[in-house]
Each structure stands twice: as C-alpha cells, then as structure tokens.
Image (spheres, rainbow, N blue to C red):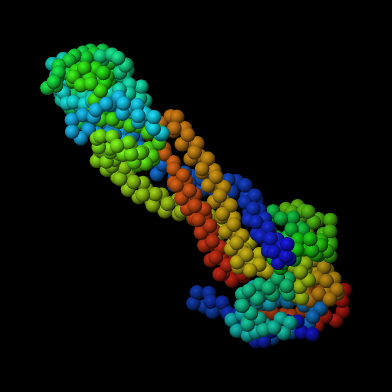
Amino acid sequence: MKIIETEKLAKTYQMGEVQVKALEGINLEIKQGEFVSIMGPSGSGKSTLMHILGLLDNPTSGEVYIKGEKTSELDEKEKAHFRLEKIGFVFQFYSLLKGFESLEQVILPQILEGTTEKKAKEKAQKALEKVGLGDRIHHSPSELSGGQRQRVAVARALAGNPDILIADESTSQLDTESSEEIMQLYRDLSEQGQTVVTVNHEKELGKKADRTIWLEDGKIKNKKEKKSQT
Amino acid sequence: MPSGDKMKLNKIKFVGKLALRDIREDKRISAIIILMLSFSFLNLVFFPAFINGLSHTFTEGIIEGNTGHVAIEAENGRLENAGGLVKKISRLEGVQEVDKVLETQARVTYNGKTTTVAVKGISAQDFPGYNSKIDEGQFLKKDTDEAVAGRFLAEDRALGTVEGIDLEVGRNLEINTQDFQAERKVRGTIGTKGGIGGLSQQVFLNYQDMEELTGTENRADTIKIILEDRDDTSEFKKTLQKLNTKGEIKTWDEQSNLAEAIEATFTIVINILSVVGFIVALAAIGVVIFINTSKRVREMGIIRAIGARKTRVIQIFVLEAFIFGTAGLILGKLITLGIDSYLATNPIASPIGPISTEISQVLLLTRSAGMLLASVIAGFIPAYLTSQTEIVETIENR
C-alpha cells in the first residue's frame, strides 16, 4: 500500500533576482513499512524534499499524497493535525526543548494531541524504552550524549504511533558509533512495520535502508532497491 | 470532569509549563527583564504621583494658610456668635480643626521701614498647618499678646505683595490700622520661601488679642474649617448648608482662583506626562518582551513541527509575556510604594514646601492594567508574526 506519493513535485526559491530550482519533477512512491534513504550531494534538495513530505514546507508545484490524501487541499489546522498524528519528524540538529526531561519532551506532542497525562506518560515511557532510553527518562538534554538526544527526538516522533517517521540527516551531528546506532534503530523500527524515510549523506549509513533514492540538482537520478540486509 | 475539559486543562497546563520553563531556564535574563519592566512601571506611576504631590503641596499651602477646605465668610459686617459656631462645627464628623479669624489691613513698621499687610487674629494656635510652617522662632501661644510675622517681612527686598522690612524675631513690630495702634513682640516668622498660601505675607495675632484691639466680641470675619480628608470637601459644604448659618459657605477652590488654576494646570501636566510616560513605558516593555520572544523563534518552529497549532504557540508566548509583565508589575509596585513611603516620612524640601508622592488607587489600577496589556500585546506581536512564517524558515533561524 502506497503511503507517500508525489507527482511532479517542484520547489523554486527566489534568491535576489535568481530563481533556484531546489526540486524539479519529483515522482516517487513509498510503501507502508518501507525504509527509504534519500541520498545525494550537498544542495541536491534532500532536506527540501523532506520538509515538503513532512508538511513543514509547501511545494511550488506538484502534489504530495499521504495515505491517499491530497495535502495541498489541507488547511493550516489540518496540516498541524497531520504533523501531530500521521508524521513523526526527526531534525538534523538537536531539536529538544531546553529545560525538559526526556519523558516531558516525548509527552509534549501527546498532550497537544489531547491525550490524558496518564496515557501520554505510558506512551512516552514505551517510546523511550523502544529507543533504549528506558533508564534515562528523567534526564534533561544537557545530561545526555548527542546520540541519546537524537534517540529522545526519535522517541518523541514515535510516541504518537505515526504512519511515517521522517528523519532529516538526523545523524549528521553524531559520531560514527552513535550514527550507526541511530540507523540500526531505524532499521529495527522498519522491521516492526514502521515506514521510515531518512536523509543520509554517508553511503554506508544509507545501506541500512531497503531502498535508496539518489537526488542530484533537485532531480531523482536512480531508485536503488536493497538486495540484502545486514 | 468531562474528558474534553480535562484535555483542555492538560493543554493549558503544558502551555503554562512551557512558558514558566522559559523564564526559569535563563534566570539572569529573566531577572533583568523583570527589573526593566518594574522600572517601566515606576516610570508610569512615579512622575504622575510626584506631580500629584507637587499639586497637593501647592494647594494645601493655600488651604492651610488661607482658605481652609471650607470656610464661612461674613457677607455683611461680621459673623455673630463665632465661638458657638466653632463649637457646633467642631462636633461635625470629619472636622480636624476650626479656626475663627478676625482680619484687617494694617501698616506694619519695624526699624523705620513700613509695609502694608493683612493682620489676622486666629484661634487655632495648635493647628499643625501653622506650626509646621514656622521658619524661625515659634508660633503663637494662647493668651499672649505677641505676633507671628510672614517670613517675607524679615527680608530687605520686595517679595510678593510685601515690601520686606528686615524684621527680626524677638523684636517689637508696630501695627497701625484705622481703628487701633499696637506694638507686639515677634514670636516667630512663618511661611515658605515660595510664599504659597499667603502665610509669608501676613501677620498673625491671637484671636482674643485681636478682639480687644478691634473692639469686637465673639465675632469673626471668617470661620475656616480644616477637614480630615480633602475629598470630603463638597459633601461637607452640603452638611454646613443644612446648619443654616449666616454667611457664605465656600470650598477652597471657590475661594481661591489661584488654587483652582494650580490644580487645573497640574491636572493638564499630569495628563500630558501620563500619555508620554505610557508611550515610553509601552515602547520599553514592548522592546524587552519582543527581543526575548524573538530569541525563541526556532523553538516555536520545532513546537509547530511536532504538531502544535499556531494558536498554541501564540498562547505560550503571550502567557510568558503576561508572567513577565505580572512579575515586573509586582516588583515595580513594591519599589514605587517603597519610594512613596520613604518620601512620606522624608519629603523633598522645596521653596513651596515639603513634596512627597501622592499615589491614588485609580493611578495604581490604570497603570497596572496598562502595563499588563502592554506586556500581552508585546508578547503577541512577535508570536503572531512568527506563526505566520513557514515552519522551515523559523526552524532554520538558528
């Protein structure tokens, strides 16, 4: 079942008098439970594509369908609801809120969703255990390593049981060991049926995905299927 | 509780938690913001309160030294049975002091120098309004035939309507009127340097002494009444009218055009100062909260990216601004009231008399409401503008 589909997706930025085409004619399909890695050189449009798929940005033209729903027809309120319930987003940089312990970070979107505090705590605890931080629930970001912080961000994205987990270069700030741990976490989640879309700049990390989509100058160059899993 | 309400409460709790977290997170910056807001409040309240105090000193000088809060003036000749009237009025509620006054114009001479002044025989020798205005020596003592002279008489130059005669305390002053001639030892000099209220350019004698000198008995030109609370003046006038006394009853502002003009002028000054002060304070509050809120643009983006709606983001920052505004207001109020109580016991000495601040409940309430409103608006504007920006743009605002 297709969970994400794009049609002739394009994004153009106006930089002074120059128009920069960040994305051009992107057609892609991602199935439910698939682990897709989007790769490409710097400036190829990877993050722009992720932001549009995560409904954080609007395309200049083209269409994005999530679970068959035409996202261009959603108003701001509906988009916020989509981001809350259907999409979990992990950012490139540490996106935790200062002064909140791990459990509170993960609870936040649950509360916004309207879940009761008790249920939100249960869900948050489960999500933190899922990412291997069951013993760090009362730690604040400053008491966690870079890898652990990104795990909290993954737990936050997962706590609401989203249909899609989108991770935009979520390992770029991490050392090799932490990066591999995070990618393995995505792999594990994918094997549990979670749809995962990541952006990676290192080919080795991208190999953990089922499929790699290569972007260059805002266009898809190839769609590489994974043959074997490590 | 219905689950919908519980959910709403949870969201409000979290909005509150986020707002409070921001304040706790950077205690030093928060303390500076609160301190700046408290000074803005001080600016909003202190200057109007000071001008109020200044206006009060001016008019009180006229009231205490000349008009009283309310006075009964003789219409033809003099008021009869002045003693009985004083007793009757003294028993009325809210009366602090009643003074029967006999007045005449006189030429006073000292050491060969002569000037013309009003000479008043007064009965309220213990009235603090006289005693507190003594410049040198002492005020009149009951049953003595002495005089207290306005301080301008002790000068060697013309001041106000008086030609100074270089008068000295302890020496004799010659008083000449159409009806009598007398010589009285000067017990003290009275009045402020600025001469407000006329005390500085008059001569005071005891009422009994004046009675004997003018050959009158139990009569008065004016009955001057000082009230415990100046705000009761109009009501007290009505009470007096019900007594059906002879003479014309006038409030202080009806008696003195100068006092009325001063009060009206200061009201204009306070209004202008208030408007300017409000603009300056609102700008200061706005800038402080705007800068503080703008620092958190990226965090707003993150909160929106994980599913918060624009309104929730605005709520967080408006609440934060409100908390800052309230804290600044409380601290500002404490500082203002601290200065106010200090000035109440240590007023600023000025040529027109001691000046302290006068803070009314209306002043405090309107300024407090203005301060909170300004804080909320100042928090709302950047939060609203940021909420209109694409999430990606706010997140990339590192």
Residue in front for this viewpoint, B339 or A91: B339
Residue in front for this viewpoint, B24 or A178: B24
The residue sitting at the left extreme is B178
Task: Say above or below: B61 vs A184.
Answer: above
Looking at the picture, how far across and down is residue B298, in whole percent? 61, 63
Taking the spot 57% from the left edge, 59% from the top edge, the residue there is B318
Evaluate whether residue B80 shows in this view. Answer: yes
Looking at the picture, how far across and down is residue B274, in whole percent? 39, 49
Left or right, B282 with respect to B10, comes to: left
Task: Say above or below: A142 vs A108.
Answer: above
Taking the spot 28% from the left edge, 15% from the top edge, the residue there is B187
Q: Quadrant of residue A158?
A: bottom right
Evaluate whether residue B149 shows in this view. Answer: no
Q: In which quarter of the image is residue B2?
A: bottom right
Which quarter of the rendered picture does the C terminus of chain B lie within?
bottom right
Left or right, B209 with respect to B116, comes to: right
